[in-house]
Image (cartoon, rainbow, N blue to C red):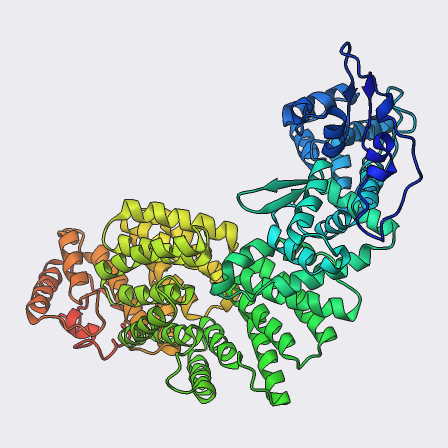
Amino acid sequence: MILDNADDAATFFGQAQSYQRSTRSVKSSPAPSLASFLPQAPNGCIVSTSRSEDVAFRLTGNHKNIIRLEPMDWREGIALLEKKLHNRFEKDVALELLQALDYMPLAITQAAAYLNRLGARGSLLKYLELLQKSDDIRASLLNKETSDLRRDEHASNSVIITWQISFQRIREANPSAAEMLSLMSFFDRQGIPEFMLRNYANNHQDDNEGVEPELKFEDDLATLRSYCLINTDTESHMFDMHRLVQLATRRWLAASGDLNFWRRKFLRILSAEHPPGDYTYWSKCKILLPHAEAAAMDEPTDEHSLRDWSLLLTNAASYASARGRYGAAESMARKAMSAAERGFGLEHPATLKSMNILAGALLHDGKLKAAEETYRRALNICQVSGQDHPSIPTMMGELALVLAYQGYFQKAEETNEEALKMHEKVVGKDHLAPSTIMNSMALILIYQGKYQVAEETIRRHMDAYEKVLSKDHPATLLTMNILSWTLVYQGRYKEAEDLNRQGQNRFQNVLGRDHPAVLGITNSLAAVLGRQGKFRAAEEMGRSVLTKYERILGKNHTATLESLIGLSTILGGQGKYEAAEELIRGAMEGREKEFGKEHPDTLRSADCLAYALKMRGNCKAAAEICERAYTSLAKVLGSDHPATVGCYRNYSSILQDIAILAHGHKYRLRQLVWIVRGAPDSTAASSRTSSSRKQMLLQHLQQLAEQRAKQPFTWRRLPRLPPAFDCDARDLLSVSDDRRV
């Protein structure tokens, strides 16, 4: 004997034996008990199919007699699709469709029947696109009935209707389990945290007086598990749902008019549970972020839910930004800001907080102009309203960083000083300054070439952060990364390497391998290795960083462009000047587009390009590019800035190569070029050229002048060297009035 679809306990055991635990339960019509009519003879057997494990147990009397049908795997799904579908199909598309249908046989059969009815106009790809388009279209497709003569004529062949029959039976037998299912349908389908469901159940014990809370909670879960509506993970205390079950549950709630009620309840519960994105709460934020992103898909209409939605997305955006997901953070922060303006008002602290988080996401995503506009708007609102918002100093510090990145160093320094004064005014001088302000100050000093002052500043505050926060706090680690760059710029490569390796390990443990901050310190380590001649390891590391930057941040992000320059330097050190030139041109083009031709980063790229061109023998083009770069750097940064001095050295070297190639082909050019380039120490702008080296330089140049061809060579005038050098280049290079090298 076969009992198909034996899902309703009341059908077999009578209404009195079904669960009646709430006055709100809907009593179904009395049904005759069939269990007593089932044969009890030792001969023959009875096979029952059921979606309810509880009914299956009561029919068999022993769990050992229950055969559980696990979800189909992809091979079984493909086989079923091949059997049901008339037309041929591509395997890759079929696998994606099976995944979208959760490998459910009825859903697969229903999809095949729909496509067969369309004939040549139907395809798996079109059906998959329709499924993924929206919940309404997905529900419409899965709600279509298909005929199957082998099944009971009263049994539904629609996935949605089939599930909803189960939901109705759960509501009748165990209303609190149906309520839990209703709430779970609004979460992301994976990783639904047990603590949230337990908190909800504990807060609704008034509906179940006289029942032990722990027993009631477990009984509700057992009911949902027995119908195979949820999966449990006892180790992680998480629950999963099939996407089709979630869809069917929402359609069921919409049909009964309860959809908005449960959506509001879900938002209120999740908003109250989701903490800010501070490092202290990261473990909880990690669990709740997918559910916040699921909630972000549907904007509520009523005022109370709009406020809950805004607060939830603000906290979720803060965490997403801290974890390097800047695109997701920007999207959620924009929604949160818009909702907060309508729900709370423009001058409310919640609105300003969402603005601050949005600006931070834009800053880290490389959208500097948009970030500056957002910061200024938030600060202007605070100024007009007269608010002393606690995040004002932090916003000003980040605004200073935005200005520095855009090359407005004087404005950046003034803004950061104002931020520090405001912080001291609010909390006092003895209170630890926010890392944002101090890191901005150090980066501004680095941009200005004040490496030693930047190092002293950052070391002082890094020690304080380690004591107050911890060694592994993100603020401490970011400070360590900035410190490593101050060491690199001062030529202290071994110290920088040790610090970078230490920071890289700690960064990866806290943030993960692909966080932009981890990539930043790895890029710094690659640069240090390259400057120490460890080119193989440096190139491998630099290429890995560049690939990840392009994938995570995009090809035009400032960090990606910086890594292009770093990798080109490593390639140049190995003599791969053609590849280096290609990378530099890409970085220079991106910086010109983002910042303009006169930005210091663009000009430094031009300096690097000139060097690559010189090493490839194109000295004329190199000289023209380098001269423009030097003139602009002297104007923007000043003649004494290390970047300007370095550019001048490169320019002088290019001109010397032109002269030597023009008139010194008979001599040992490699030795001569080595002496010419070695005259100034390339690692320190303030170094003095020794008198013996000058003498050696002059002797070789005099020999060259005496032995060279008689044709006069007109030497173009060099710009004046910065005060850091002993003398003008013409004094070193002049041999006589009518002959110059």
Q: Nearer the viewer, residue 699 or 155?
A: 155
Quadrant in the picture for the N terminus: top right
For residue 669, above or below residue 375: above
Q: Nearer the viewer, residue 631 or 313?
A: 313
The part of the image, by quadrant, that contains residue 740 is bottom left
Look at the image and tell me whether residue 242 can be seen: no
Name the residue at the right extreme. 29
Picture coordinates of residue 464, whole percent (x, y): 33, 74
Look at the image and tell me whether residue 386 can be seen: yes
The residue lying at 27 percent from left, 53 percent from top is 529
Name the residue at the top extreme. 43
Q: Nearer the viewer, residue 461 or 674?
A: 461
| Side of 682 where 47 appears, left or right | right
Picture coordinates of residue 272, whole percent (x, y): 64, 65
Quadrant in the picture for the C terminus: bottom left
Picture coordinates of residue 392, whole percent (x, y): 53, 81
For residue 422, above or below residue 739: below
Name the residue at the front extreme. 210
Picture coordinates of residue 153, whole percent (x, y): 92, 25
Q: Nearer the viewer, residue 295 or 457?
A: 295
| Side of 611 where 708 appears, left or right | left
